[in-house]
Image: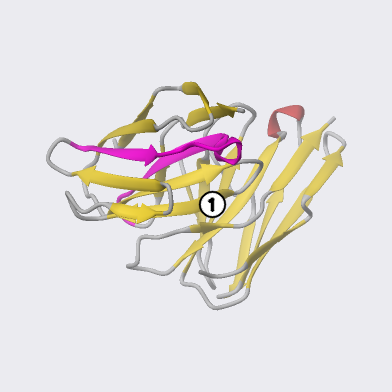
Amino acid sequence: EDKVVQSPLSLVVHEGDTVTLNCSYEVTNFRSLLWYKQEKKAPTFLFMLTSSGIEKKSGRLSSILDKKELFSILNITATQTGDSAVYLCTLNAGNMLTFGGGTRLMVKP
Amino acid sequence: SAVISQKPSRDICQRGTSLTIQCQVDSQVTMMFWYRQQPGQSLTLIATANQGSEATYESGFVIDKFPISRPNLTFSTLTVSNMSPEDSSIYLCSVGQYGTYEQYFGPGTRLTVT
C-alpha cells in the first residue's frame, strides 16, 4: 500500500526564519510527488516533482526529490506570516493522490 | 491550470437529509475526483468520477451513500445521502489531465450536519 509520511507534524517559527518540511514515501508505481499549501479549504498547488535531484523553485519556496532514498523536502526561506498553513505532500501513483498527514506551519510576527 | 468552482461553498444540514455538491470546470478535463477532509484530518479520496459511467469508489465509500454523476468533461456532482453528524467535513473536487500527474482543487464545500 502506498504511504506518505510528513514531518514534523507542526512547526512554529518567527518571521524571517528558514524552514524545511520533510516527506518520505513508499510507493509501488511512482508517477509524481506533489506539494500543496492548504490555508482554509482548498489545497493550492505548489510543485510537482518527477525527477531526482532537480530543484523546483518559486520565490521563497523550493523543493527537491530523492527517488533513491524516497523522500522530498520543501524549503521556505525568509518566512512570512502569510506562509502559515498546512503543507501537504502527496503521492501520485497512477492519477490517484495519496496524501500525507500534513505539516502545520505557524509563522509568528 | 483550470478554474474550478464548487457550489455550495458551505451548508448546514439536518441529519437524515441529502446534499448535492456541484463541481464545474472552465475547460474539459479527463480526470475528476472527489475528496473528503474530516476535521483535523488529511484528505481522503472518495471516488473517481468517470464521464458517462459509474464512479470508481475507494474502500469504505459506497455509491448508495455518495452517488456521483459526471455527465460531461466539465461537470460533476457528489451527493451526500442520509447525512449524519459524522459526515460533517470539507468536500473537495479535484481535476487533472490523464498522464500529466498534476491535480488542482476546487474551493471546497464545508458541510455541517446537525
Exactly how many numbered labels are in the figure? 1
Question: Is A79 a magenta residue?
Answer: yes
Residue A36 lies, with reference to residue B96, above or below; the image says above
- On the picture, is B73 further left or further right than B18? left
Q: Position of residue B9 (x, y in %)?
A: 77, 52
Amino acid under label 1? Thr
In the rendered view of the protein, which quadrant contains the N terminus of chain A?
A: top left
Q: Which image quadrant is residue B110 in?
A: top right
The color scheme shown is secondary structure
Region in magenta: A70-94
- On the picture, is B89 further left or further right than A49? right
In the rendered view of the protein, which quadrant contains the C terminus of chain A?
A: top right
Q: Chain of mark 1?
A: A
- On the picture, is B25 further left or further right than A75? right
Question: Is A75 a magenta residue?
Answer: yes
Instruction: Bin the neighbour count of mark 1 within 10 Å (Cα to Cα): few under 14, some 14-19, many 20 and up.
Output: some
Q: Position of residue A100 (x, y in %)?
A: 41, 34
User: Residue at image x 57%, y 36%?
Assistant: A85
Residue A13 lies, with reference to residue B103, above or below; the image says above
Q: Position of residue A89 (x, y in %)?
A: 40, 40
Residue for badge 1: A44
The answer to which of A43 and B14 lies nearer the viewer is: A43
Q: Position of residue A27 (x, y in %)?
A: 24, 41
